[in-house]
Amino acid sequence: MLMREERELVAIYGRKLIEAGLTTGTGGNISVFNRSKGLLAIKPSGIDYMDIRPEDVPVMDLDGNRVEGELKPSSEYEMHAIVYRNREDANAVVHTHSTFSTTIACLNLEIPSLHYLVAFAGEKVPCAQYATYGTKELAENAMQALGTKYNATLLANHGLLVLGRDVRMAFATTEQIEFCAELFYRTRCAGEPVLLPQDEMARVAERFKTYGQG
């Protein structure tokens, strides 16, 4: 089976998204990119995460061609592919409709530097302009918001998009940004959050480059 490891990771981390409460039903999507092959494994469209087997996961190239797999890829394929085309540090992408991130996205707000864990994304979490789901316009808006320095962006009136050097890091960033989104929501309900200065966020981001066991 072509891209067995990557397809297994899509199935495994898709279930983790459900178990962690980061998405529901068939919402959101996840992909893993093999840069040496130029191919990505991506969640199949409209299939419950708990039912996905590795062989169900489509393998695509960056031009939209299905290389292996019988099922259609996620409708947000282009939003994943554009990240891999433009960010050489990205080897996995996670897109969710997690509750607090989506709440902030529906307000069309950014998540500022209210907590050091925001640095998983960068100095803040920007918010990409709205476009209809599954469109090239949405993919371009998301990429414009990510640019070269952010690892996550909110998608206005939609959800959250995260990239990582591997799927473990993309999943961890998704969890941490959802936590920060909840903090932002709660602090805004109580008043105004006190923000960390940008030089501190830069220091934390540098430390995160060696986060984990390597």
Image (cartoon, grey):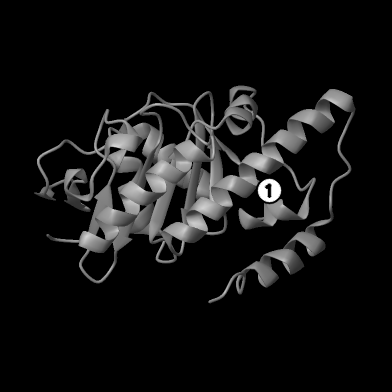
Q: Position of residue 98 (x, y in %)?
A: 55, 32
**Vertically, is 9 above or below 18?**
below
Q: Position of residue 104 (x, y in %)?
A: 65, 29
The crowding category of the residue bearing disc 1, from other C-alpha atoms within 10 Å (few below 14, some 14 to 19, many at least 20), is: many
Residue drawn at x 27%, y 31% is: 47
Quadrant, the N terminus: bottom left
Relative placement, left or right, of 19 versus 192 is: left
Residue that carries the numbered disc 1 in the rendered image? 124
Relative placement, left or right, of 136 versus 99 is: left
Camera-side residue: 68 or 53? 53
Residue drawn at x 48%, y 45% is: 144
**Vertically, is 86 above or below 45?**
below
Residue 134 picture quarter: top left
Q: Position of residue 61 (x, y in %)?
A: 18, 54
Residue drawn at x 67%, y 71% is: 206
Relative placement, left or right, of 96 versus 184 is: left
SS label for mark 1: loop
**Vertically, is 131 above or below 211?**
above
Amino acid, disc 1? Lys
Q: Position of residue 207 (x, y in %)?
A: 69, 71
Residue 111 seen: no
Camera-side residue: 103 or 140? 103
**Vertically, is 123 above or below 95?**
below
Residue 132 picture quarter: top left
Residue drawn at x 59%, y 22% is: 106
Relative placement, left or right, of 90 versus 193 is: left
Residue 193 seen: yes
